[in-house]
Amino acid sequence: MLNPLETTKSQKEAPAYEFKSYMNGKQIKTTTKKGILNPKLPKDLFEKVMTFSVHFDAAEDKAVRHTYYIGGEGTSDGHHVISYILRTGALWRDVIEDCAINIEMPKRLGQKFHIVSPKEHRASIENDKIRLHWQFYNIKPDFDIHLEALPDFIVKFNSDELMKFMKSTNMYLESEYVDSVKYT
């Protein structure tokens, strides 16, 4: 399996590599195009996008499936992020009736990711691979799926070192919880 944290030539040429689309189990053609700004998503301009065409007759259901590898993004301090851009599904004409998302990675890489948002609906380890699964119904998504690793230097801190680091960088977090109970 390709390392999702390494960048390859084919990844630089498209937003995902080995991108394949299927309709009702049969592979269909995909095309890489230059991204354009959509007024419905004014903050999103993707440099390159993968496109495909599927014709739907009235009241027709079709299963569309995509498979691909992504590398995510990384910084020199060891901070890694892998994102599945789901919010573009809000551009579909109607709601997405049934949407399953599966992410698979080698077990050794899964240990790097400390934040998964939104939380996966199911997780498993099989044959030295971690599989994360989400299932959504009747959605017009306004969110993405993110897997994020804390920077390497922070992960190596014990709790005392982390507190010292937070104080030295003026990191401060305050939270307040208010509980209220209404009796009737």
Image (tube, helix red, strand yellow):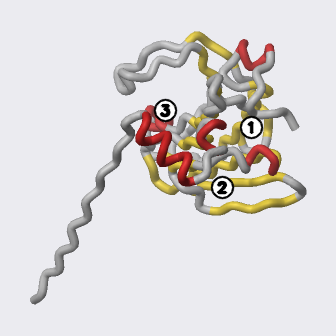
Disc 2 to disc 3, C-alpha distance: 19 Å
* The C terminus lies in quadrant: bottom left
| Residue drawn where x is 44% and y is 22% of the image | 44
The image quadrant of residue 29 is top right
Residue type at mark 2 is His
Is 165 left or right of 32, judged from the image as shown?
left
| Residue drawn where x is 48% and y is 13% of the image | 36
**What element does badge 1 sit on?**
strand
Examine the rendered structure and indicate whether residue 85 appears above or below residue 31.
below
Q: Nearer the viewer, residue 112 or 24?
A: 112
- Pick whichever of labels 1 and 3 is earlier in the sequence: 1
Label 2 neighbour load within 10 Å: few <14, some 14-19, many 20+: some
Residue that mark 2 sits on: 133
Is 16 left or right of 138, judged from the image as shown?
right
Label 1 neighbour load within 10 Å: few <14, some 14-19, many 20+: few
Residue type at mark 3 is Thr
Residue that mark 3 sits on: 88
Is 53 left or right of 91, judged from the image as shown?
right
Disc 1 to disc 3, C-alpha distance: 17 Å
Residue farthest toward the left in the current orientation of the protein: 184
**Which-is-in-front pick, marks 1 and 2?**
2
Percent coordinates x, y for residue 15 in the rendering? 66, 22
Residue 67 shows which numbered tag? 1
Examine the rendered structure and indicate whether residue 48 appears above or below residue 99.
above
